């Protein structure tokens, strides 16, 4: 239909099945494309995340983004995280044009350590990580399942989800304390 405003729902990018992702990656490689992948919590999506995702996308023809589930994040970041529920984090990522496919990452042991199921299934050509996100021993394990591992510096100097949350809480506590002092 000419002039139609029909838009495809970007949430179609969310693919929970690692087998389907692996098949897509094999098909893309068969026609000469490079598959890039990254994983994160993507809690309170901010400028550092978006810069990072765009750089990760530039490393391949397709960018697959793993999203830590709420359960996984609680195991390695504590009971107060995530701030934004898994489904909403996935949807926010689906609106980013640099993100081609999104999948859950829930294979985290009780100590909060990732078990590599996604990269073992997909075997990306490039895995992109943020500096200080993985210890060297874990990067070595990741390298066993990928063609290349690229470690990037953080893309926003002062903006992180932790800093945003702590800053907001501190401002609210300061304001409450100030009000209490006035009443005393």
Image (cartoon, rainbow, N blue to C red):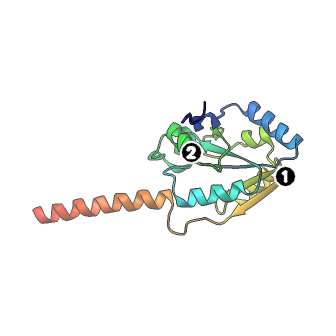
**Count of all numbered marks drawn on residues in the image:** 2
Q: Horizontally, is 161 left or right of 119 in the view?
A: left
Q: Residue furthest bottom?
A: 157
Residue count near mark 2 (Cα–Cα under 10 Å), binned few <14, some 14–19, many ≥20? some
Picture residue at 73% right of the left edge, 39% below the top: 117
Q: Which residue is mark 1?
A: 147
Measuring from the top left, give residue 75's x and y in whole percent. Answer: 55, 44
Looking at the image, residue 129 lies above or below residue 85: below
Residue 146 drawn at (x, y percent): 81, 49
- Snapshot quadrant of residue 176: bottom left
Q: Say which residue appears at 54% left-offset and 36% top-offset.
A: 5
Q: Position of residue 102 (x, y in %)?
A: 64, 40
Cα separation, mark 2 vs mark 1, equals 28 Å
Q: Is residue 184 visible?
A: no
Along the viewing direction, whichever of 133 and 154 lies nearer the viewer: 154
- Where residue 106 sits: x, y (%)? 62, 38
**Quadrant (top left, top right, bottom left, bottom right) of the C terminus:** bottom left
Q: Secondary structure at mark 1?
A: loop
**Which residue does the numbered mark 2 point to in the structure image?**
95
């Amino acid at each position: 239909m000419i002039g139609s405003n029909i838009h495809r729902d970007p949430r179609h990018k969310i693919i929970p099945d690692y087998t389907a992702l692996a098949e897509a990656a094999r098909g893309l490689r068969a026609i000469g494309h490079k598959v890039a992948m990254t994983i994160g919590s993507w809690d309170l999506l901010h400028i550092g995340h978006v810069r990072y995702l765009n750089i990760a996308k530039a490393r391949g023809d397709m960018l697959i983004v793993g999203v830590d589930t709420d359960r996984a994040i609680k195991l390695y970041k504590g009971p107060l995280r995530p701030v934004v529920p898994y489904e909403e984090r996935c949807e926010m990522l689906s609106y980013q044009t640099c993100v081609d496919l999104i999948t859950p990452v829930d294979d985290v042991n009780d100590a909060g350590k990732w078990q590599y199921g996604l990269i073992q299934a997909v075997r990306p050509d490039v895995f992109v990580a943020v500096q200080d996100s993985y210890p060297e021993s874990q990067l070595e394990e990741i390298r066993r399942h990928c063609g290349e591992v690229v470690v990037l510096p953080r893309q926003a100097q002062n903006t992180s989800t932790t800093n945003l949350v702590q800053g907001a809480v501190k401002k609210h506590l300061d304001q409450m304390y100030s009000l209490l002092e006035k009443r005393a």
